[in-house]
Image (spheres, rainbow, N blue to C red):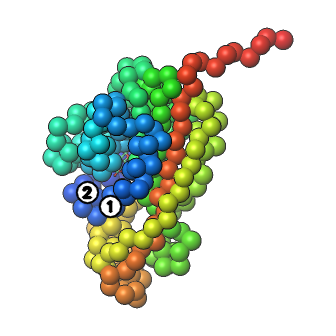
Amino acid sequence: MTTNDLGTRGFARGTDRYERARPSYRQDVLDHLCAAAGIGPGTRVLDLAAGTGKLTRPLVERGAEVVAVEPSAAMRETFARVTPGVPVYDGTAERIPAPEGSYDVVTVAQAFHWFDPATALREIARVLRPGGVLAMVWNERDQDDEFVERMHLAAEWPFRIFRDYRPDVDASGLFAPTERRVFRWRDTLTHDRVLERVSTFSYIAAMDEAPRAELLSRVRSAVTEQPDPVDLAYVTDTYIARKHDRARPEPAAG
Ligand SMILES: C[S@@+](CC[C@H](N)C(=O)[O-])C[C@H]1O[C@@H](n2cnc3c(N)ncnc32)[C@H](O)[C@@H]1O
């Protein structure tokens, strides 16, 4: 099992809260992803690490034939309730339960950083048809913003998720050069909603009750210094990588 334990365990706690508190994907972001990946009526899409279906649903609304894969049983349960009519299978990015070449597009929202990148990229390329597309997206708080920085400090945020993932994908040699596009925006949220969102961070959700409450009270102090509601700065980071049409030729001998 190569799945990062925290990546599934943290998200398994409070999946309804996750569904309620995490941001959705903006229309301009969805327009870009669908145009660049060629997603429309009848496109066969695999939404990998689908969670509760936050990206799955808008893809279905655009007519795509979406199938979801998600390793957390608790997430799959919530997915089935809030994203009815879409099949969701148990599986990981490192072991995708799908035949070779069976999808036009694989989408990965807010999750590639949990994967073993080399193994996952091989699996993603395996289930894509030749010329198929990997589309990835992250909604991340803008770590260059002063308030976000203070809030992250209080929350002991341990990650640097917002970084350039193109080298990871390009190093696999399985895709044409990856295209990246970044969107900056602000989410206007009440203090309570900010705190609820922070409580969905995987490492916080996985904590025991007492240290979790203590940490959240430090976050509350940072948040309540701001006007209510607060404008939270976000960066949405998108990547499009097209699988090579056919296997790359072996390098010539000698
Ligand atoms: C932040 S959530 C994103 C969920 C959803 N895509 C969204 O946009 O809301 C990350 C998801 O990745 C899943 N996950 C973690 N490790 C994984 C792996 N190795 N393979 C597939 N999914 C994984 C977790 O169970 C969780 O549902």
Q: Is residue 58 left or right of residue 186?
A: left
Between residue 49 and residue 61, name the one nearer to us: 61
Residue drawn at 38 percent across, 70 percent down: 187
Residue drawn at 32 percent across, 81 percent down: 229
Q: Position of residue 110 (x, y in %)?
A: 42, 51
Quadrant in the picture for residue 192: bottom left
Q: Position of residue 94 (x, y in %)?
A: 45, 32
Q: Position of residue 147 (x, y in %)?
A: 48, 79
**The residue at label 1 has a CB less than 8 Å from ligand 1:** yes
Residue drawn at 45 percent across, 76 percent down: 151
Residue 72 visible (yes or no): no
| Placement of the C terminus among the 4 image quadrants | top right
Judged from the image, the secondary structure of the residue bearing numbered disc 1 is: loop
Q: Position of residue 36 (x, y in %)?
A: 48, 42
- Amino acid on which the number 2 mark rests in the picture: Glu
User: How many residues crowd mark 2 within 10 Å: few (<14), some (14–19), many (20+)?
Assistant: many
Q: Is residue 215 left or right of residue 239?
A: left
Residue 186 sits above or below residue 94 on the image: below
Q: Is residue 15 left or right of residue 133?
A: left
Answer yes or no: do the residues labelled 1 and 2 have beta carbons within 8 Å?
yes
Residue 64 numbered mark, or none: none
- Amino acid on which the number 1 mark rests in the picture: Arg
Residue 22 numbered mark, or none: 1
**The residue at label 2 has a CB less than 8 Å from ligand 1:** no
Furthest residue in direction top, as rendered = 253
Between marks 1 and 2, how big is the CA–CA gap? 6 Å
Residue drawn at 45 percent across, 67 percent down: 185
| Placement of the N terminus among the 4 image quadrants | top left
The residue that mark 2 highlights is 19
